Amino acid sequence: GVAAWNYAHGGRSGLNALIENRRSILQEKQEAYAWVRQRTSPDTRVVAFEDVLLYLYTGRQAVRPISFLPSCCFTDEISILQADLDHIEDVPRHIHASYWVMSDDYFSSEGSIPQIHERIIQLKATLPMVFSSSEGHVQIYDLSELVRSSPGDSQAQSLSCFSREPCGVTR
């Protein structure tokens, strides 16, 4: 029943549009990955919503800055989403990330929620851009000022999951 309803109400056309949009930006993402490979050291930490792809294309440590709670996307409870957005800078600060890779096709799975886009626009306005792809759909932002202004949370810094040891284990 769900498959028939989805087919009848344009689920396939929406999915096809999403696939085409992501395909059209892939070349620009590869430009960004090349920039990261050529201009950063192997121990550079990067924040990216597609952290796995960044790692596979560059070999650099990468992590997704935030995973939104599912309830933010399926309810009208804006306070849940706002609480998530209030912490979008926490991961880059705590892992001492150097760069943030952003792409125009991010958040399509979150249903293009306006609050998410507004927060990303605010964030982009405060960070210096160091790379923009040929069509401008993919950007890389320098996080050195954000990390430098990080509150001195020594416990969070000591629990970095990017060490060779399991997270939280020290010798």
Image (cartoon, grey):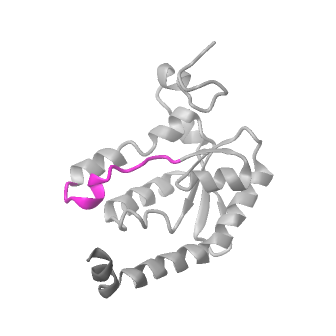
Q: Residue furthest left?
A: 76
On the picture, is 18 further left or further right than 59?
left
Figure quadrant of residue 162 = top right
Q: How far from the left and from the top, in percent, is residue 124? A: 50, 57
Going 52% across and 76% down the picture, which residue do you hit?
19
Q: Quadrant of the N terminus?
A: bottom left
Going 37% across and 62% down the picture, which residue do you hit?
110
Q: How far from the left and from the top, in percent, is residue 59? A: 73, 47
On the picture, is 36 further left or further right than 148?
right
Q: Main secondary structure of the magenta part?
A: loop
Q: Residue furthest right?
A: 38
Going 42% across and 85% down the picture, which residue do you hit?
13
In front of the other: 49 or 87:
49
Membership of 70 in magenta stretch: yes
Q: How far from the left and from the top, in percent, is residue 53? A: 63, 56
In the depicted structure, whether residue 166 falls above or below residue 132: above
Q: Residue furthest top?
A: 171
In the depicted structure, whether residue 20 falls above or below residue 155: below
In front of the other: 136 or 55:
55
Q: Residue furthest bottom?
A: 8
On the picture, is 80 further left or further right than 169?
left
Magenta range: 64-77
Figure quadrant of residue 83 = top left
In front of the other: 30 or 127:
30
In the depicted structure, whether residue 89 falls above or below residue 11: above
Q: Quadrant of the C terminus?
A: top right
